Image (cartoon, rainbow, N blue to C red):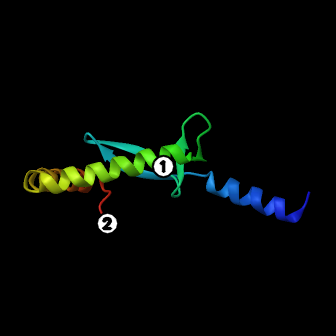
C-alpha cells in the first residue's frame, strides 16, 4: 500500500476513537463519549463518525436559535442555570468528581 494512503487511514482511525468522560445526569454517574469537532458518536460501531454537512447546518441553526432565546429570557435563564449549576456541583463533589 502507498505510504500516503496508510497515513490517511491512520488519521481516520485515530479520529474514530471516542474519549470516555464521566458526567452526572439526573443525580447518577454516567459515561459520555466525546468525539473531535465535526464528528459524532455512533453507538452501533462504538466509534466516531464524520457528520454530514446537512447535520452540521441543522446544529448551527439550532445553536443560533438557542442563543436568541437565551438573550430574550436572560434573567430567568440565569437564575435557573445558576441553581442547576450549584446542585450539579454538589452532586459532583459527593461523587468525588470535582477538580
Quadrant location, the C terminus: bottom left
Disc 2 secondary structure class: loop
Check the image and report above or below for 41 versus 93.
above
Question: Marks 1 and 2, how far apart in space?
Answer: 32 Å
Question: Is 81 in front, or is 97?
Answer: 81
Residue at left 92%, top 57%? 1
Discs 1/2, front: 1
Determine which residue is flagged by label 1.
56
Residue 29 in percent (x, y) is at 34, 44
Check the image and report above or below for 66 versus 26.
below
Q: Is residue 85 visible?
A: no
Q: Quadrant of residue 89?
A: bottom left
Residue 44 in percent (x, y) is at 59, 33
Q: Is residue 14 visible?
A: yes
Residue at left 26%, top 55%? 67
Residue 52 in percent (x, y) is at 56, 45
Disc 1 secondary structure class: helix
What label does residue 99 carry, if any? 2
Residue 61 in percent (x, y) is at 37, 49
Badge 2, how many Cα within 10 Å: few under 14, some, many 20+?
few
Question: Is 4 in front, or is 92?
Answer: 4
Q: Is residue 84 left or right of residue 59?
A: left
Check the image and report above or below for 46 versus 3.
above
Q: Earlier in the sequence, mark 1 or mark 2?
A: 1
Residue at left 28%, top 49%? 65
Residue at left 82%, top 59%? 6
Amino acid at each position: 500500500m502507498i505510504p500516503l494512503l496508510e497515513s490517511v487511514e491512520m488519521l481516520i482511525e485515530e479520529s474514530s476513537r471516542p474519549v470516555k468522560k464521566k458526567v452526572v445526569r439526573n443525580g447518577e454517574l454516567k459515561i459520555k463519549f466525546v468525539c473531535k469537532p465535526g464528528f459524532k458518536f455512533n453507538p452501533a460501531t462504538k466509534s466516531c463518525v464524520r457528520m454530514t454537512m446537512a447535520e452540521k447546518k441543522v446544529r448551527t441553526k439550532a445553536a443560533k436559535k438557542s442563543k436568541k432565546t437565551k438573550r430574550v429570557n436572560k434573567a430567568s435563564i440565569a437564575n435557573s442555570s445558576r441553581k442547576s449549576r450549584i446542585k450539579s456541583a454538589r452532586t459532583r463533589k459527593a461523587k468525588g468528581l470535582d477538580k
